[in-house]
Image: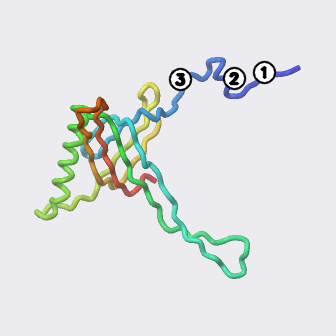
């Protein structure tokens, strides 16, 4: 006598797994928060959230099967955030960048040098509840780009914020 299949597809078909019950991260739902400043709002794209483990290969005499791997350093990619320009959220980014600019040059006037700040990228589920959060250390803005304004197009105006950081592991 054959038994009914019990895989995840069967559970989905029976309604045991459903989007309403799932805690899957939705790639298009995430927000960014800066320590000691607050939320920069929701973004439509986040690229560059990665880490590379660099190593050096050492060939040892008499060992003909493999090489010895010596760990060197971790390298983190720059984070690039993109979204449509919005009145309140774009103003938050501009205010944060003004604060960073003030701190960036503050050491020339006897203030402490800008050391970077912590930042969180928080992934949300279909119900806008947190699924996972990446804690970035020593975040520095690399660039901000406003929209290309052109009367010949009907595209959405986008802003882009690129960030350097010293890791999330």
Looking at the image, is 27 positioned above or below residue 15? below
Q: Residue at x 18, y 53 (%)?
A: 101
Q: Residues within 10 Å of mark 3 (few under 14, many from 20)?
A: few
Looking at the image, is 5 positioned above or below residue 152? above
Q: Residue at x 26, y 40 (%)?
A: 148
Q: Residue furthest bottom?
A: 61
Marks 3 and 1 in Cβ contact (< 8 Å)? no
Image side of residue 14 versus residue 139, left or right = right
Q: Residue at x 20, y 43 (%)?
A: 94
Q: Residue at x 85, y 21 (%)?
A: 2
Q: Secondary structure at mark 2?
A: helix
The residue indicated by pointer 1 is: 4
Gap between marks 3 and 2, in whole Å? 15 Å
Among numbered discs 3 and 1, the one appearing first in the sequence: 1
Question: For residue 135, which numbered disc appears in the image?
Answer: none
Quadrant in which the N terminus appears: top right
The residue indicated by pointer 3 is: 19
The residue indicated by pointer 2 is: 10
Q: Position of residue 117 (x, y in %)?
A: 29, 52
Q: Position of residue 58 (x, y in %)?
A: 60, 75
Gap between marks 1 and 2, in whole Å? 9 Å
Marks 1 and 2 in Cβ contact (< 8 Å)? yes
């Amino acid at each position: 006598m054959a038994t009914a299949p019990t895989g995840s597809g069967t559970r989905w078909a029976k309604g045991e797994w459903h989007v309403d019950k799932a805690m899957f991260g939705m790639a298009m739902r995430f927000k960014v928060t800066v320590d000691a400043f607050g939320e920069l709002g929701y973004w439509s794209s986040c690229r560059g959230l990665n880490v590379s483990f660099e190593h050096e290969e050492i060939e040892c005499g008499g060992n003909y099967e493999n090489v010895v791997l010596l760990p060197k350093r971790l390298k983190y990619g720059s984070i690039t955030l993109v979204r449509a320009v919005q009145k309140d959220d774009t103003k938050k980014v501009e205010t944060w960048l003004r604060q960073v600019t003030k701190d960036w040059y503050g050491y020339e006037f006897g203030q402490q040098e800008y050391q970077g700040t912590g930042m969180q990228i928080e992934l949300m589920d279909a119900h806008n509840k947190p699924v996972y959060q990446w804690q970035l250390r020593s975040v520095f803005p690399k660039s901000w780009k406003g929209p290309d304004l052109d009367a010949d197009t009907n595209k959405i105006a986008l802003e882009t914020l690129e960030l350097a950081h010293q890791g999330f592991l």
